Amino acid sequence: MRPATPTHAQISWAPELFPPLLAPATARLRSRLTARVGPDGAVRDPCQSRVLESVLALNLLERTDLQPQRRTRLVDYLRAVATTDPLDRILVDLALTRTATAGPTAGLAEVFLARAPGFTGARKHAMFDATFALYGLVPPRPLDPGAFDLTGLHCWARVQVTAVKIVLADAADRHDQISDEDVRILLETQRQSQVWEDNVLIHLWALHALHRLPHTEHVVSEGVAKAMAHQRDDGGLPFVANTDTWCTATAGVALAAAGAPREVLHTVAAHLVSQQQPGGGWSYTDLAYQTDVDDTSVAIQFLDTLDTVRYREPIRRGEQSLMAVRNPDGGFPTYIAGAASEACMTAAAVDALTPQWQRRHAAIISGLEFLADQQRADGSFPPDWSSSRLHTVFRALLATTRNPGHHPAHLLQMTKQIMTLVLDGQNADGGWGQQHGEPSDPISTAYALIAVCRQDDPAPAARAATYLLSCQRDDGSIAAISDSIGPRPLRFTIPVLADIFTLLALGHLDRRIDERVR
């Protein structure tokens, strides 16, 4: 994600080609994000309410007859929520009126699954079915054993798959398919004083499953209290409590790119070092232990950008964590070795490892080759953890164009296809949408701006900067729709990420503007 040092082959761009308010607007955004760095070095922002978790919570409270005041606030949230998403609308109707039937869901599962990676299809379909089974809409097909295979799943997926299996087995009156091991997996998540792994969605699924089993009343009651402690001011519940480590790592890279004070950057670094797990990786937030390639890659990049020598040991351990999950196909999964390799995670890992070319060149080259194999005919890549197709695109471009020693013709062709896709997708207002033809949004535009900073024509970057400045509020923040998704393909919102990625893009742009003529 970090900006690269411009090469002699790159043409510097004259400042007068860009909006005259670009520098003060960037400074306001940098000040805004710097002020978000807490005394402990973390950048914290709670996850906002979402329909799915709010519906799951309301259904659970109605079944258990617990916390009536909290139940009323959930109803108020669902009545007031403004959403055009078809799945959200059906869930709200089910939760509030119970009048929806299986008819409106016809074909919705296929649309839902088309936006998620193919290898997640069976278990995502099961989650979709289980959600409607809560309201008596039992799927006509029998339980698919493949949807409940725990082989190669990280801990969050294991719990969710197990919970969904129990909900569906109960709905189909197939309690013979529920094992003691299934119950053990779920009960283990309830032994902490807070929501397990800070993941509200998985916690709610576990409670729904346990509620259907005998002698679980006390566990469920305590679990409901833990879940409802995360009820937001608007009455809804979020997907996760927060993504504070992800926000901190990405903010660190953005602030470094935009020239924030070094003392602030070292405060951020100290917090990230304190959050590094014993195995060397990072999780998405302070209270979670499941590490992932994305957080680990960005944390490594930030520490390496700030001070390679000072943070040598955390960087080394982080690299070891990445290498431990690398797959034989050269790609990297999101969470654990043996899971399906993904283009976005591979781009992230390769970009993080590139400064260690001498030691890691074999992993970098095989990762780049994996990326080339994953690219689609239009230049894009399979779905990732963003609802914007430009997310993997810009990260793949960075990973490919700044490696120092591997430039075969097919990789050059990959970067050419990426740039063509990006340049062809710019809207008349200067921005980009999450998908081709969609209205512009700041986060997608930030991703695209980072990409166009890797080519020589300044005009697309100037139009993008003009659009981004039009999205800035008086306080310096950026008004944007979210692109973060989880579980895929469901979108959730952490507002500060719009500020972070916009500042990161403006930092990339700043590296291309000629300092000598300012």
Image (cartoon, rainbow, N blue to C red):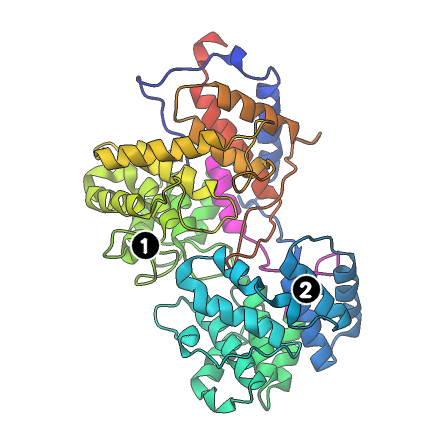
Q: Position of residue 19 (x, y in %)?
A: 59, 17
Q: Residues at badges 1 and 2 in contact (C-beta under 8 Å)?
A: no
Q: Is residue 441 shown above or below 157?
A: above
Q: Considering depth in this image, is 287 or 388 the residue closer to the camera? A: 388
Q: Position of residue 143 (x, y in %)?
A: 47, 80
Disc on the earlier residue, 1 or 2: 2
Which residue is labeled 1 in the image?
A: 321
- Asked whether the viewer can see residue 111, the reply is yes
Q: Name the residue rendered at 50%, 10% in the picture.
A: 518
**Residue range of the region highlighted in magenta in the rendering:** 227-256
- Mark 2 neighbour density, 10 Å: few (under 14) some (14–19) many (20 or more): some
Relative to residue 292, is residue 106 drawn left or right? right
The three-letter amino acid code for the residue at tag 2 is: Ile
Q: Quadrant of residue 64?
A: bottom right
Residue lying farthest to the top in this orientation? 517
Relative to residue 507, is residue 20 drawn left or right? right
Q: Secondary structure at mark 2?
A: helix
Which residue is labeled 2 in the image?
A: 90
Q: Quadrant of residue 98?
A: bottom right
Q: Name the residue rendered at 62%, 80% in the picture.
A: 220
Q: Is residue 252 magenta?
A: yes
The three-letter amino acid code for the residue at tag 1 is: Ser
Q: Name the residue rendered at 72%, 69% in the picture.
A: 95
Q: Considering depth in this image, is 205 or 378 the residue closer to the camera? A: 378
- C-alpha distance separating marks 1 and 2: 42 Å
Q: Is residue 323 shown above or below 457?
A: below
Q: Is residue 254 magenta?
A: yes
Closer to the eye: label 1 or 2: 2
Q: Secondary structure at mark 1?
A: helix
Q: Position of residue 444 (x, y in %)?
A: 53, 38
